[in-house]
Image (spheres, rainbow, N blue to C red):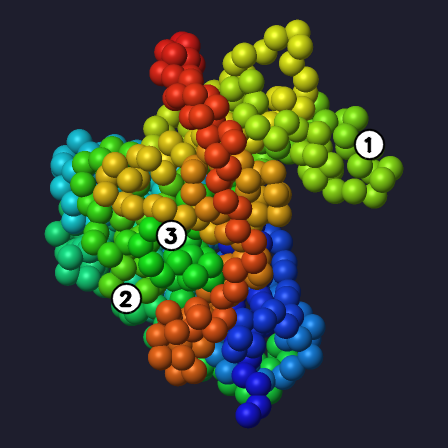
Amino acid sequence: MAELYFLGLDAGTTGCKAVVFDRRGRQMGRGYREYHVVCGEPFQAEQDPELVCSLLKESIKEAVKEAGISRIEALSLSVQGDAVIPVDRQFRVLHPAVLGMDYRSRKQCRAFEEKYDEWELYKETGQPLHPINMMAKIMYFMDEKPEISEKTWKFVTYEEFILERLGGEPMIDGSMASRSMGFSLERGTWSDGILNKMGIPGEKLSRVCNSGMPVGQMEKKTAEQMGISNRPLLIAGGHDQPVGAVGAGIVEEGTGLDSTGTAEVLSVAYRIPAVNKSMHDSFYACYYHVIPGMYFSFAHMQTGGILQQWYRDQFGSPELAEAGKRGLDYYTYAQSKCPSGPSAVLVLPHFNGSGTPLCDMESKGAFVGLTLATTRHEILKGIIDGLCYELKFNKETMESAGVPLSRIRAVGGGARSPLWLQTKADIMEMPVETLVCKEAGCLGAAILAAVGSGIYTDIPEAIKEMVKTDKVYEPRKLFRERYREQYARYRKLYESLGPVFHT
């Protein structure tokens, strides 16, 4: 039987990827392009969606060429959440995409909160009232850019926009719709009551479909431009976090995905919707997984790899120079100098404010426990420990809210650091697994494409064939008690320093 190939697309905030996989999940070719975010005024974050789509097509062409193939069965996509693009009836862009990190809709959120009960909003939608969400962006357009809103046929996300540009029907999947702040989790439809309170006409929103559903075929001319000889099926994708979880094989309760790049995200899937006061007060959203019948939440930590980069730039010159002489990776070399157990230095990693469950943007970073005997290597290990303590804080908070977690799979840049992975296993007291394929978002999209095209009957079957685990880091008993003691001290840092930060 001839081999079958699938494309997984990942349209992120600052770059896009396209990866070709075979039906066993082996990576055959990859393309990548970067683009910019416009931040010309306070709280602004905009982007040219036509440029993003153009560069995504370039990435597809590069991936197909590298794979040395010409036929693609199907493609699907993983997209950044919460971006809003107003288009007219001809699907022409009326305004740059307003990204999730654009917080200019704070005014609209405050106005909504003054009139309506935020808890009632959360109970119906699973989303805390926040400027990041799609409906907050649309309220901003309706209030402050009426000349755009009046011309707008639909407010779309990158999912609908990319599907339409490739030749498909512009539909939004359940994972994207259910994190918009305007979708009823119980009914599985847009909430007319919530939309009316927000002043948003329901007809300006896209039709909702299931992830993995075929929504058309790529246009022949578009396919030819990218070196594809047939017209691949276009399959509805999803929000980048749950699609990445599929690429990591997260299909059962109790397994979480730890994605570490500039910042860090801990994602968890579960069967019964967790819409309660504990989740709400900890700023955890509850929305649809791309797997039918499952729900999804994630914790977001404001720093991750960027904190180790900060340490390198400020204190790591000796290791940076030595690693360069030896032809070694700086991070691998610098971490080899760190103590293997808990650092005596406690680090509060709130260098960009705190993420969940505190969400205190006034919080700051702190080093505690320095003496004249402290080495920079202990400080670096303290940074790694602090990031892991913050991860454990989120894990415990989620569990207390009814979201179970017993093991973790790690992806992203942090998954290439044995010291960081082992420290996570030790502090979290649970196994941490890595994956053969590091492109979890693209692989998750390719899995949706394979299921949507009928090659596999469902997502769990596809995952068994396409997702492969690599190494497992088991928690070590040797350091258990010392890490527990340091974690107890760590939990007191914010409580003690918070009042200082707020002055």
Is residue 124 shown left or right of residue 128? left
Task: Name the residue carrying label 3.
Answer: 255
- Where is residue 123? Give x, y as percent: 16, 45
Task: Name the residue carrying label 2.
Answer: 292
The C terminus lies in which quarter of the figure? top left
How crowded pointer 3 is (Cα within 10 Å; few <14, some 14-19, many 20+) is rated as: many
Is residue 87 shown left or right of residue 115? right
Q: Of residues 64 and 198, which is closer to you in this image?
A: 64
Q: Mark 3 or mark 1, which has the lower sequence index?
A: 3
How crowded pointer 2 is (Cα within 10 Å; few <14, some 14-19, many 20+) is rated as: some
The amino acid type, in three-letter code, at marker 1 is Ala
Task: Name the residue carrying label 1.
Answer: 321
Q: Mark 2 or mark 1, which has the lower sequence index?
A: 2
For the question of whether residue 52 can be seen, the reply is: no
Q: Give the structural element (helix, strand or loop) at label 1.
A: helix
Residue at 54% of width from left, 25% of height from top?
342
The amino acid type, in three-letter code, at marker 3 is Thr
> Is 477 rendered above or below residue 160?
above
